[in-house]
Image (spheres, rainbow, N blue to C red):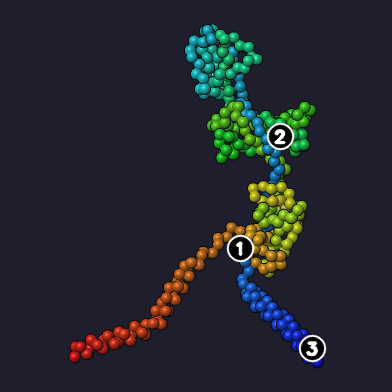
Amino acid sequence: MKRSTKITSIIIIFFLITATVIVGRTMIGNHFKKKFSKRPPPGIIVKVVEERLFQNIIETFGTAIPAQIKSYNIEKYEILEPIKFNSKVKAGDVIAKLKNRNIVAPFNGVIGKRDFSDDIKVSKSSLVINLEDASSLFIDVDIPEVFSTYVRKGLGVDIKFSGNKEKNYKGVVDSLASRIDTNKRSLAVRIKLKNPNLEILPGALLEVTIKYNERNSLGIPDTSVILEGNKVYIYKVNKENITKRTEIKIGSRSKGFLEVKSGLNNGDTIVAEGLKKVRPNGKIRPIKDGAKKSKSSWGGKNKSKKNNSETKKSKFDWIKNIFKKSDSKKKEEKNK
């Protein structure tokens, strides 16, 4: 009997402890659930999906060539006056005065001296000068044949020069070769660039970006996407400010925006930034993209501190008044 009583008491104690733990955990869970449920939803930057300009590009390099160039072979003994190299001349100006003739510029340009390589045979008594019109430049580039069907005359071209990388020069596709180069497997393309201030010198190496297939498509910030393997997700926000994780298909990227091919509609609202704060089917406090954040509440806190200090002072004013009254009574007694 004593043994069975001990076993029964142990079982009862065990169940009491178990029940206490379960009740305790439930109470603690409810406490924290109430505590965190009272927290306001996080402020998240959102953006309305809208159409943007997208385009495909071909990037390559090319060398600047003057639009017009004329060369003259002169015998040195014929020169009557020194030739002013690197000087600008106008059409009709005399480039070189010779014994039997004068060389007149057929167009506006700059007088230059040609450099020779070993394979060009020129006598020591001869001089070759160039007249170059660099107010317009040509850039000859080779485009891989896979892009040959996209390139056509008149396409816009962005050009950058290493001497001034901050400036973006504008050019156009001027002409194309009629066939693919079988050795290079490329298409020869000539680009025309206006250079009225002669900022780019002939022979300069230029970065060339040919733009094609321009179109208006839905675009979203690249900060709004979640990449998981080959899949792309965003958080769509409904009218009740509840987020929904949604899969989308994307296309090309341009200036920090991604082209959306499917999964979103024009006018949809999505989370633009702060993805780490967002939970699926969670509520947020939307902040419109570009809106100024509310000013810090430092001023308010300071004011409240001041108010608190004032209230504290007012609480103890009655003590000060007692001491003031006692001091005034002592002064009156002394006067008597």
Residue at 77%, 27% (x, y): give it. Answer: 183
Residue 37 relative to residue 334: left or right:
right
Judge whether residue 238 can be spotted in this image: no
Tag 1 near tag 2, CB within 8 Å:
no
Residue at 59%, 27% (x, y): give it. Answer: 202
Q: In the image, which is nearer the foreground, mark 1 or mark 2?
A: 1
Q: Return the residue at label 1.
A: 287
Q: Return the residue at label 3.
A: 3
Give the SS element for disc 2.
loop
Name the quarter where the C terminus is drawn.
bottom left
The type of residue carrying mark 1 is Ile
Residue at 54%, 64% (x, y): give it. Answer: 294
Residues at marks 1 and 3, CA–CA distance in whole angstroms: 70 Å
Using the image as rendered, state which of residue 61 and residue 187 is in the foreground: 61
Residue at 27%, 85% (x, y): give it. Answer: 327
Q: Residues within 10 Å of mark 3 (few under 14, many from 20)?
A: few
Residue 307's image quarter? bottom left
Mark number for residue 153? 2
Q: Residues within 10 Å of mark 2 (few under 14, many from 20)?
A: few
Tag 1 near tag 3, CB within 8 Å:
no
Q: In the image, which is nearer the foreground, mark 3 or mark 2?
A: 3
The type of residue carrying mark 2 is Lys
Residue 110's image quarter? top right
Residues at marks 1 and 2, CA–CA distance in whole angstroms: 45 Å
Residues at marks 3 and 2, CA–CA distance in whole angstroms: 103 Å
Q: Residue furthest left?
A: 336
Q: In the rendered image of this protein, does residue 308 appear above or below residue 333?
A: above
Q: Residues within 10 Å of mark 1 (few under 14, many from 20)?
A: some
Q: Tell me which numbered mark, 1 or 3, is placed earlier along the sequence.
A: 3
The type of residue carrying mark 3 is Arg
Q: Position of residue 98 (x, y in %)?
A: 52, 10
